Amino acid sequence: MNTSPLYKYRCVNKLLIESIINREIYFSPLSNLNDPTDCQIKLRRSFDIAIHQTSGKQQKNLKFYKGAMEGFVSAVEDRIQSFGIWCGSLEANNSLMWESYADQHRGICLRYSFPGNIVEPNPQVLIGIHPVEYCNNPVVNWLIKNADHVPSLNFSEFPESLIVKLLTSKDECWEHQREGRVISLNFGSKKIAQARLQQICFGLKTPMSDRALMLRILKQQQYEVTVYNIVRDKNDFGLALKELTAKELAPLY
């Protein structure tokens, strides 16, 4: 089965240890995301901009959509406020992510792998995993692109791609994160299969005591993970992942 990996940069602290022991990941409510504009795109405004940028049949369709979906847009904007977002990066050797989210290389990076586009086989709980698009006007562009297709007026059949676009679009200034997201229909901690956690990677400055602590907890909880270390590569500022050998790991257990 094809899998989609996401890398979670973490500080070594009580919250991290509890999440590993409890086999959970936390889906943040949209209001808690660190960018106050994230997931807060206003559909009515996007419609107005898209209408202004089109003409002919496309503009006519968009005007019709906006009027016909007035109550529908409100329902969507209200409904997604109960959704949850779990964020990860698409890469494990991102210098800025190590700096910002892993305690300046003193933390760790965990690799989680999810099957296909759906995280678990219960679509009522999790929608799926999607890469983030970094763009100034992602929803406006989506509306213009789809202006020739009549959307359903039934909320349960609202085009998933538009909801995903709302929840997986960020300003271009965040592009360095190379982010992927798992979307849940509700926020909070959720259990995941133990096999989802597949790899741990230590930073350039992760203390030996924290390395030993994390490996001991993973072993006690019977996780089967590969262990890597961030190293400097041949480029002046480059980073690479190096898998640790049994001999290198022995002093840590």
Image (cartoon, helix red, strand yellow):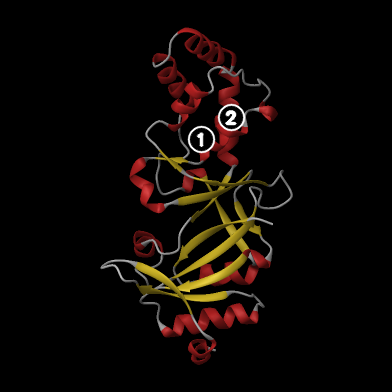
Judged from the image, the secondary structure of the residue bearing numbered disc 2 is helix
Q: How far apart are the two marked residues, 1 and 2, measured between alpha carbons?
A: 10 Å
| Residue 80 sits above or below residue 231 on the image | above
**Looking at the image, which residue is at 45% across and 85% down?**
209
In this view of the protein, which residue sits in the foreground, 123 or 70?
123
Judged from the image, the secondary structure of the residue bearing numbered disc 1 is helix
**Looking at the image, which residue is at 67% across and 67% down?**
194
Can you tell which quarter of the image residue 154 is in?
A: top right
Which residue is under mark 1?
A: 166
| Residue 174 sits above or below residue 101 on the image | above
Kind of residue sitting beneath label 1: Leu
**Looking at the image, which residue is at 57% across and 37% down?**
80
Q: Is residue 123 left or right of residue 58?
A: right
| Residue 188 sits above or below residue 108 on the image | above
State which mark lies toward you, 1 or 2: 1
If you read the primary sequence from the N terminus, does the residue marked by circle 1 or circle 2 appear first?
2
Give percent across and percent down for residue 206: 40, 77
Task: Pick out the residue farthest to the left.
Answer: 236
Residues at discs 1 and 2 in contact (Cβ within 8 Å): yes
Kind of residue sitting beneath label 2: Val
Local crowd size for mark 2, using a 10 Å CA cut-off: few (<14), some (14–19), many (≥20): some
Query: Residue 106 shows which numbered tag?
Result: none
Can you tell which quarter of the image residue 79 is in?
A: top right
Task: Pick out the residue farthest to the right.
Answer: 121
Give percent across and percent down for residue 124: 72, 43
Give percent across and percent down for residue 30: 51, 43
Q: Quadrant of the N terminus?
A: bottom right
Query: Residue 76 shows which numbered tag?
Result: 2
